[in-house]
Image (cartoon, grey):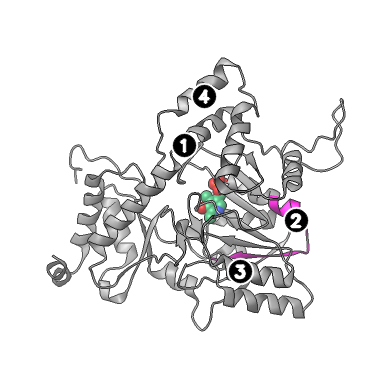
Amino acid sequence: MSKPIGRRRIFLSSPHMSGKESLYISEAFATNMIAPLGPNVDAFERQVADYAGVADAAAVSSGTAAIHLSLRLLDVREGDRVFCSSLTFVASANPILYQGAEPVFIDSEPETWNMSPIALERALEDARRSNWLPKAVIVVHLFGQSAKMEELLELCDAYGVPLIEDAAESLGSDYKGKASGSLGRFGVYSFNGNKIITTSGGGMLVSNDAEALKHARFLATQARDPAPHYQHSRMGYNYRMSNVLAGIGRAQMEVLEDRVSARRAVFERYRAELGRFPGFEFMPELEGTRSNRWLTALTLGEEAGVSPSSLIYALAEEDIEARPVWKPLHLQPLFYGASYYPHGEESVSERLFRTGLCLPSGSNMTPEDQERVVDCVTRCLPAERMTKGA
Ligand SMILES: *Cc1c(COP(=O)(O)O)cnc(C)c1O
């Protein structure tokens, strides 16, 4: 079957440059500040720290590296446990394994799709009883929606366990007037190519604990002791961000608000067009929070008359990239045998995985692009729904 001419591929979430990136990159070239670190890194760190309203930020090579460093800073080691949201990308939990520690997965609740305070409380209570409290709790803000931070922080404080925010997907989102990622002991942002803004690859560790971030920078540059010769007494990493890539980040930060508005508009357009069909339920937004709507996510109930997988297949046939919701980590072969605490009778993350779908959500999508997606989805619906909706 030949493809219609002139139809370009629609990606789930592709990089969206502002045009000013080359300016900062040229600066790096003009001054020969190519090698790691330099003025772009310093400026980019300041920009993100100011935006998040925290004391300091450390630019690193990826969001995963930032999560790993946060675990090192909290002295997570072999034999320790770390609690983590189950409904997330594998990068949230891989660093737990890097440290030889054991992940315990916590279910979602239906109002944010993020960590259930009810399940977390049960897990913490069990841990206290067996005298084996976790060294940290990693809370993910899925698709840009902040988790119920007040409740989660209160629990973590009560049990004396530090909270790490995996805000890789939620840069630009707010939680009750504060930046998502700024409320925990540490926050993590990602600038991977598919995120709301990008440096092609990179991450940021943020915190109000400036001393801890100083130590993070030390660990991220091979843990060199202050000596003229190369002396090392601790194991470090090569995790810092390059001055060239930080130049991209500087220009991207300047348009972050525009990117959030654009993604939110994409979400609203989908909801207006598809929300009228029975069984189509869009990801909620918790009162008092503002999601960056990094990805438009929805669930399809029985009444929809079509499954997420058949929609993904039909969209792929038209060169449109759509994806299921993350497969919960407690169902991943990698974490076989790990403990899991469901929200209640029902495992919410498993239902979201079974019924969930992410539509193309790039801030650079045109209205015509979105119309193509909507048309394709609509054509997949059983005939009677189409006429009812029309
Ligand atoms: C993208 C992502 C990461 C990892 O970020 P990288 O910069 O790709 O290492 C971690 N957690 C979540 C939830 C993500 O979506």
Element on which disc 4 rests: helix
Q: Amino acid at mark 1?
A: Glu
Element on which disc 3 rests: helix
On residue 254, which mark appears?
A: 1
Residue, x 41% and y 48% (percent of image)? Answer: 260
Q: Is residue 341 visible?
A: no
Q: Going from the N terminus, do you reach mark 3 or mark 1 first?
A: 3
Q: Nearer the viewer, mark 3 or mark 2?
A: 3
Q: Is residue 300 above or below residue 364?
A: below
On residue 25, which mark appears?
A: 4
129 on left or right of 176 = right
Alpha carbons under labels 3 and 2: distance apart: 18 Å
Element on which disc 1 rests: helix
The reply to whether discs 2 and 1 touch (Cβ–Cβ < 8 Å) is no
Q: Nearer the viewer, mark 3 or mark 1?
A: 1
Query: What residue is disc 2 on?
Result: 74
Residue 297 inside the magenta-drawn segment: no
Q: Total number of numbered labels?
A: 4
The reply to whether discs 4 and 1 touch (Cβ–Cβ < 8 Å) is no
Q: Which residues are magenta?
A: 70-86
Q: Ligand 1 closer than 8 Å to the CB at disc 2?
A: no
